[in-house]
Image: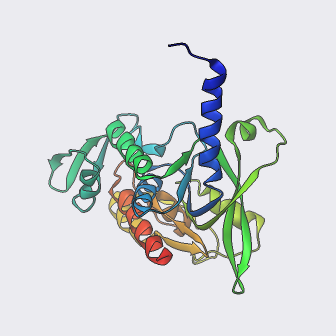
Amino acid sequence: MSLDERTISEAIVTEYYKKFLSSLSLDVAIVGGGPSGLTAAWKLAEKGRNVALFERKLSIGGGMWGGGMTWNYIVVQDESKGILEDAGLTLKQFKPNYWTVDAVTATTTLASKACLAGAKVFNCTTVEDVCLRDVDGVSHVTGLVINSSPVEMAGLHVDPLVLHTKYVIEATGHPTELLKTLVRKNDVSLNTPSGGIEGEQSMWAERAEISTMENSREIFPGVYVVGMAANAAFGAYRMGPIFGGMLMSGVKIAEEINERLG
């Protein structure tokens, strides 16, 4: 059977822009494709939500790929291992409350679960700004301003595009990129002690795993924060290559948003 290069191009262009057009009005937009963002995308899409995930890099998975120091195994604890088991993974117990799994297997499985559930992933896409609107007299984030990551990297003066969304999940990890843009460009206060981004503290895995769940919540009207971004926003500790709190964080916020969407 012969192949025509033009038809190959036509297929890619057609299907991509169908996906893009279906994402101009979202239930949930997730910024950052690490473990928290992927888990939230999976659980939201399972409920039939129109959800899209935007990742600046070519690959999704965040820091999960490399395990610890590029040694690609990760650890989860008892409370969270069920999430990975629900995804179809088999974990190995190292010691009581310490479960290991291959980092590449875990990352690709979470990505697959999210996509097969219906979440739409846009990699090589930078979220460079937000849309703010008054809703019942309160300022809400109601949209994202996106551009091509290569455009950003090259420093080209190319205007972005905009999409609307009911809720945003900030899942950019340590950098808290979405929140930094929101605070820097607008006279707004976050739901933090100072009203700004508190900044993460040094390593303390036990405390960080607990605070990840505590800090995963709505931080500004229309914006939820998950995973390491939650700890960085609220001034808590980092946890390193244990990922249970991040997974549970994604599930928690997906459940809260699902409830609000009705």
- How many marks do you count on the picture? 0
Q: Quadrant of residue 165?
A: bottom right
Residue 42 vs residue 154: left or right? Answer: left
| Residue 108: image location, x then y, percent | 38, 40
**Which residue: 45% across, 44% down?**
63
Q: Is residue 204 visible?
A: no
Q: Is residue 59 above or below residue 254?
A: above
Q: Is residue 53 visible?
A: yes
**Which residue: 37% across, 57% down?**
247
- Tell which residue pokes out farthest to the front in this image: 1
| Residue 246: image location, x then y, percent | 40, 58
- Tell which residue pokes out farthest to the bottom in this image: 137
Residue 14 vs residue 107: left or right? Answer: right
**Which residue: 69% across, 86% down?**
136
**Which residue: 41% across, 39% down?**
65
Residue sitting nearer the eye, 87 or 116: 116
- Tell which residue pokes out farthest to the right in this image: 157
| Residue 195: image location, x then y, percent | 64, 76
Colouring convention used in this rendered image of the protein: rainbow
Residue 55 vs residue 212: left or right? Answer: right
Residue sitting nearer the eye, 232 or 167: 167
Q: Quadrant of residue 24?
A: bottom right
| Residue 228: image location, x then y, percent | 47, 58
Q: Quadrant of residue 122?
A: top right
